[in-house]
Image (tube, rainbow, N blue to C red):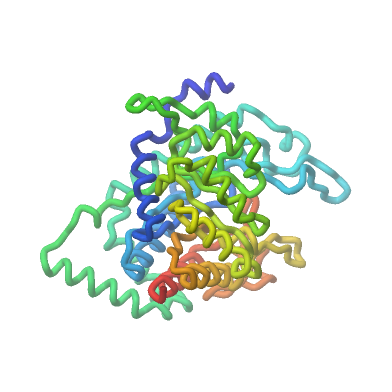
Amino acid sequence: MITELESFPPLVFAGECDQLRARMAAVAKGEAFLLQGGDCAEAFDGVSADQIRNKLKTLLQMGAVLTYAASVPVVKVGRIAGQYSKPRSKPTETRDGVTLPVYRGDSVNGFDFTEASRIPDPERLKRMYHASASTLNLVRAFTTGGYADLRQVHAWNQDFVRTSPSGQRYEQLAREIDNALNFMHACGADPEEFKTVEFYSSHEALLLDYETALTRVDSRTGQLYDVSAHMVWIGERTRQLDHAHIEFASRIRNPIGIKLGPTTTAEDALQYIERLDPEREPGRLTFIVRMGADKIRDKLPDLVEKVTASGATVAWVTDPMHGNTFEAASGHKTRRFDDVLDEVKGFFEVHKELGTHPGGIHVELTGDDVTECVGGGDEIFVDDLHQRYETACDPRLNRSQSLDLAFLVAEMYRDQ
């Protein structure tokens, strides 16, 4: 199985990974902003054109708002085409007195609560590869074939402002963007950059069998690249310095992310830099901070101060989702939109206080009108969760909540 995967063509190219590393260097230096988003866990049956298009559409809409309001380039990276594996807190799950192995993502076993479904199947790694290839193929077609044209993306945002109760708050910003586009059009400017968009793929490098099988030597440089995605990150549960995931990440040339939870010390952060970015190369390392709204203001300053003092130039990104999950009375895992927003606010406040750059946001979202997180402008209540709760793992922001977040983050960035 692994030998077979090793013979498959790359999903991305080393040169594209280098390009993203250059873009992430701009983020680390305070010259750009990262927007990273997508499903908590992708599913093999979610590789339809509609689902991929809706996800991409939402990210493009968020990107257009952030680019204009923040007046900086926005680097767009999807949690897409590889996010099929999930680390879990517990090895088993019990329902009605029946205990089975926990669902670990479509790359490992099935979501259905049956004994047969929960048996790990190595053949699923091949399905993961093919699903990722189909997804990337479609994303490339959408981003270069006219679908991502800025005027079209802006028209979608105007539609959101017009029809959404929360959207009306952003009418002024939408009008400003409109005036800017009309002005450029009147001047005869029609830049190529308006018609296509750079879009990169990323996922958590959790299953090392899969990642190493897709690690190749670049013919140009003789260096190793993980060609399963442009960027990979190491999760909160697998970031032990003496474990295999950090060792793997240290050997590849891709841009690397590390999730830092509330237990991370400044000493830990400095050791990650030593292991993963010994050359102190801007764009190489991104710290994705996931503290929880109640801890971000206390825990983050020490990390940022000491890393900055060390002379390393890393990109600081907030993941306001993972530290704010709770279980509703109905049994659904959910998150409050206000908590998500508060963690982002805390992240911006810390960076403003320290004179450092809030480099971006990393969110779990979907382009569909699901009911998984409570709150938001088109408010979802706890009693609504059952209506369209479709995630295979963690709750995601829906399209309206995602756009709400983009407009609110844009306002925060303007105030920096």
Q: Nearer the viewer, residue 410 or 84?
A: 410
Which residue is at the far right? 97
Please determine whether, in this image, residue 218 is positioned above or below residue 379: above
Residue drawn 68% across and 56% down?
Answer: 263
Residue drawn 59% across and 32% down?
Answer: 208
Quadrant of image for the N terminus:
top right
**For residue 292, which quarter of the picture?**
bottom right
Q: Nearer the viewer, residue 87 or 286?
A: 286
Residue 274: x and y, percent? 53, 43
Residue drawn 44% across and 60% down?
Answer: 359
Residue 254: x and y, percent? 44, 39
Please determine whether, in this image, residue 122 is positioned above or below residue 67: above
Quadrant of image for the C terminus:
bottom left
Residue 164: x and y, percent? 45, 75
Q: Does the rendering let one see residue 170?
A: yes
Q: Is residue 91 left or right of residue 316?
A: right
Residue 89: x and y, percent? 73, 48
Residue drawn 53% across and 67% down?
Answer: 347
Q: Does the rendering let one see residue 387?
A: no
Please determine whether, in this image, residue 70 is positioned above or below residue 115: below
Please determine whether, in this image, residue 20 is positioned above or below residue 1: below
Which residue is at the far left? 188
**For residue 91, which quarter of the picture?**
top right
**For residue 176, which quarter of the picture?**
bottom left
